[in-house]
Every structure is written in structure tokens, then in C-alpha cells.
Image (cartoon, coloured by chain):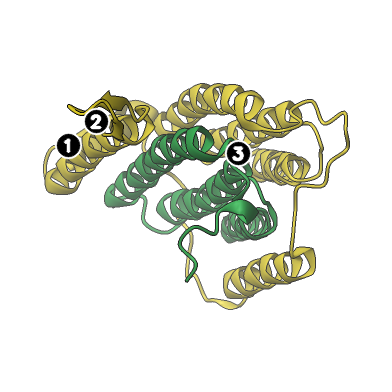
Amino acid sequence: MYAQAFFVAVFGLAAIGFGVVVFRTSSMMRSALALLFSMTAVGCLFLAMQTEFLGVLQIMMMATEMSIMAIFMVMFMMDPGGLGGMDMSHQKRFSIGAGVSAAVVAIAVALLSDWGPAAEQVVDAQAQTRALGMELLGRSMMIFETAGITILTAMIAATAVSIPVKKLASKDGKEASE
Amino acid sequence: MTMILILALVTGAILFGIGVYGALSQTNLVMIMMGVELMLAGAMVNLVAFWRFLHPEAYSGQMFVLVVMTVMALEMAVGFGVAIARFRAKGSVEMEEAEDLKG
């Protein structure tokens, strides 16, 4: 129990620390890497809470996702290296107030609620994965299938949005956009 | 065990707060998406903690985490699609310049 509490605290602090670094650094590459480390720490937090399948899935998904994000950061940012020291933020005071308020309210709910007795043990990783598979292909199959269709729709929508608009020559020689 | 649950919930709450700050304070679309990712990560930490410490027999808790992970991937895909379209049209993904729909 103490080992679990220790690892939950360590990975939780790592996730929060790297999360803060995301918005503190001027370098966009460092921001993307900090977010990758924060998400990996969240995955390790899942492992510390004995949710092995979701922990490994989180680490694998976020490693890929954040690598792609880092490439986009370099492509789209005006100052990806952060050498110019540009400030790319606005309404700071309001944002800090909103962030702190949201965190304080959620922490207050966590501390003041009566959660009842907590479970001491969970089944091992193999049994968990099997039970999750049975859940996904049984009672929650409709939700799972809907998520699949939504992913497909988003893929098509994202591709359609990002295809460049071509200029077509009309019959009278003038260009018209498609 | 309740102490570990509260530890995880506090971690999730702080991650959510950092995400709210990032989503509201950043001017760049990609950075705003990073804020939203952190908010969703905070929600996932809470969901896993609730499953592990309160209802380890109900696997719909883990299923919800999978749905949130799907939402994260979708947000990235559609967000980058919009970013590419915006960059092609205006040459920038700065959201302070995105006032096209203002009346």
C-alpha cells in the first residue's frame, strides 16, 4: 500500500510538473516534449494504480500523438525554437483565475466528499484485460462501435478540411475556386 | 487506500486546472489543443482512480477511459485539419487573428 501511494505521488507530481513546463517554456519543441513526458507520467500513474492495459495504451498512444504534435509545432509556429522569446499568451490574469478556481473546486470536492471504503485488491492484469474485452464486446458494444464510427468520420473530416482548395479554370477563361 | 484515491483525484484536479489555464491563455491553436489534452488527461486520472478504488468490479469505468482516449485522438486529428486549412488560408494559426466570423 505504501509503495503504491509513493508511486502514485511521484508520477502525479511528475505529470503536474511537466504539465506546468508545457506553458512556461518559449520553445515549442520543449512544450511538446514536456506534454509527452506529462502524458507518459499519467500512463505510469495508471500502472501504479494497477490498470496495466490502460497504462500501456496511454503511453503508446501519447508517444505517437505527441511526436506528431511536435512536428506540427515546428511547422506552424512563428518561433518554434523560442529564441526570440516571444510571449504567445493573452488574458493571463483571467486564465490563471479560471485555472486555479477549477482546480480548487475539484480538490474541494475530492477532499470533502465521503467516498466510502476503498477497494483493497483488484484482479490481475490478464483477468482485467479479459473482463474489459468482454465489457467492450458485450454490454458496451454499442458505445464502442459508435466510437469507431466517430473516429472514421473524424478521419474523413480532417482529411477533407486539410485538402488544398484547387483553382479551376472556367469555360470563359476566368479562374474559379472549387 | 482512500488516501491514494484522494491523491489521484487531487492530481487529476491540478492537471485539469493547468489545462484550463493553457486553453484560455494561449494564442496559438496548437497550444490551445495542448491545454485541452491536459484537461482530458486530468479527467482520465479521475476515471481510473474511481474505477480502481471505488468500483473495481464495474469495467464500464475502464471503457469510459477508452472513450476519453478516443476523444483525445479525435480532437488532435480535427484540430490539425483545421490548423492546416487555416495556415493555408491565412498563413498563421494565431487565434487572435481568427475574427472572420465576428459580425
Q: CA distance from mark 3 to mark 2?
A: 47 Å
Query: Residue at point 34% right, 35% down?
Result: A158
Q: Amino acid at mark 1?
A: Met
Q: Are marks 3 and 2 on the same chain?
A: no
Between the residue at mark 3 and the residue at mark 1, the CA separation in whole angstroms equals: 46 Å
How many marks are shown on the rendered structure?
3
User: x and y percent of residue A125 in the render?
Assistant: 38, 29
Out of A63 and A78, give the one closest to the viewer. A78
Give the residue type that dot 3 points to. Answer: Ser
Q: Nearer the viewer, residue A25 or A47?
A: A25
Kindly give the residue lying farthest to the front in the view shown.
Answer: A172
The residue identified by callout 3 is: B92
A5 displayed left or right of A84: left
Colour in which chain A is drawn: yellow
**Mark 2 and mark 3 in contact (Cβ < 8 Å)?**
no
Q: In the figure, residue A32 lies in which quadrant?
A: top right
Q: Quadrant of residue A123?
A: top left
Q: Is residue A97 above or below residue B78?
A: below
